[in-house]
């Protein structure tokens, strides 16, 4: 095989007895996981269980820090300063690192969640705060991001960057994601998602909702584990990519 890609989903997004999605089944399909670290979802027991299952399957372990917004699932702008963003990311990353270390493993990447993930693409102060936190904790960390301020800040800090292509979200003409509050922001048709993902990875192009052909050079494909039929969709995406000769592997194993 020639082309390699990472297949990732956001996991561990429950709390106490409440669970979101079928993480165990998804982990049989994925090569990496973004694990909630307690601020938008997740708790110590869920983090521990998710890390153990990642290790058992050879799935890459990633921190998925968020704004402190459990009620809003990390999707609201909390009006934080860049300094607060830095310390919140440190807190969440450190928690997951401790769990991974206990099990003899390590966190290999960091992927901001929700509204924080959106804002670090356009706010240079937030992007610099996240990148500096990641580099000073572990300069070997890979930062997952879309093209934008965070990707630029992480590269400036000497960090590796994995560009994320999102399988089930609509794109604007400028390459940003359509806001979730707008109709059509989330794509639900499995065949369309499979087709879009294969084209994104193999041809380096995705079509915006306005019909613009946007160049995309992604290293990892994100599947949302909290959507209906996520496991079947992940399997379909993986099968479609492998049918085109694409190897699915954790980002840390091959990204330069």
Image: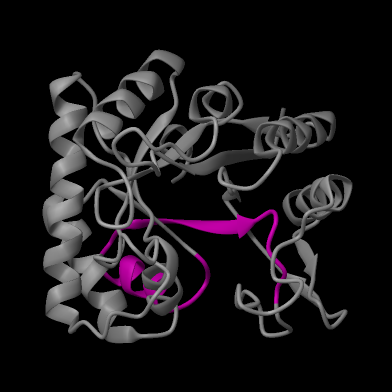
Would you place residue 139 above or below residue 118 in this image?
above
State left or right for residue 115 relative to residue 185.
left
Is residue 170 covered in magenta?
A: yes
* Image mark count: 0
Which quadrant of the structure image shows residue 166? bottom right
State left or right for residue 58 relative to residue 95.
right
| Residue at the image position 43 percent from the left and 20 percent from the top | 58
Q: Which span is picked out in magenta? A: 146-171
Q: Position of residue 240 (x, y in %)?
A: 82, 35
Is residue 190 covered in magenta?
A: no
Would you place residue 228 above or below residue 103 in this image?
below
| Residue at the image position 76 percent from the left and 71 percent from the top | 184
Q: Nearer the viewer, residue 13 or 123?
A: 13
Q: Position of residue 13 (x, y in %)?
A: 40, 44
Assign the N terminus to one quadrant of the image.
top right
Name the outermost residue toward the front. Answer: 17
Q: Position of residue 171 (x, y in %)?
A: 70, 73
Name the outermost residue toward the top. Answer: 56
| Residue at the image position 70 percent from the left and 81 percent from the top | 172
Would you place residue 144 above or below residue 232 in this image?
below
Which quadrant of the structure image shows residue 45? top left
State left or right for residue 103 relative to residue 164.
left
Q: Nearer the viewer, residue 72 or 115?
A: 72
Q: Nearer the viewer, residue 44 or 72?
A: 72
Would you place residue 241 above or below residue 85 in this image?
above
| Residue at the image position 18 percent from the left and 67 percent from the top | 132
Q: How is the image coloured?
A: one colour
Q: Position of residue 54 (x, y in %)?
A: 39, 24
State left or right for residue 157 relative to residue 236.
left
Q: Nearer the viewer, residue 224 or 71?
A: 71
């Amino acid at each position: 095989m020639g082309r390699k890609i990472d297949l990732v989903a956001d996991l561990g997004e429950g709390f106490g007895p409440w669970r979101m999605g079928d993480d165990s089944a998804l982990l049989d399909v994925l090569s990496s996981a973004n694990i909630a670290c307690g601020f938008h979802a997740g708790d110590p027991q869920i983090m521990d269980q998710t890390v153990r299952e990642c290790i058992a399957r050879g799935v890459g372990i990633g921190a998925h820090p968020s704004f402190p917004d459990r009620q809003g699932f990390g999707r609201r702008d909390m009006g934080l300063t860049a300094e607060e963003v830095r310390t919140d990311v440190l807190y969440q990353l450190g928690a997951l690192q401790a769990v991974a270390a206990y099990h003899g493993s390590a966190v290999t990447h960091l992927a901001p969640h929700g509204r924080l993930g959106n804002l670090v693409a356009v706010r240079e102060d937030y992007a610099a705060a996240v990148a500096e936190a990641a580099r000073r904790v572990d300069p070997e960390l890979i930062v997952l991001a879309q093209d934008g301020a965070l990707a630029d800040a992480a590269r400036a800090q000497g960090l590796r960057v994995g560009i994320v292509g999102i399988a089930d979200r609509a794109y604007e003409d400028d390459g940003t994601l359509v806001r979730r509050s707008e109709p059509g922001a989330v794509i639900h048709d499995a065949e369309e998602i499979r087709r879009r993902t294969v084209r994104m990875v193999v041809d380096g192009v995705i079509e915006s909702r306005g019909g613009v052909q946007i160049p995309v050079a992604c290293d990892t494909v994100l599947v949302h584990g909290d959507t209906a039929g996520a496991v079947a969709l992940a399997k379909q995406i993986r099968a479609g990519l492998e049918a085109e000769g694409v190897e699915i592997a954790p980002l840390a194993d091959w990204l330069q």
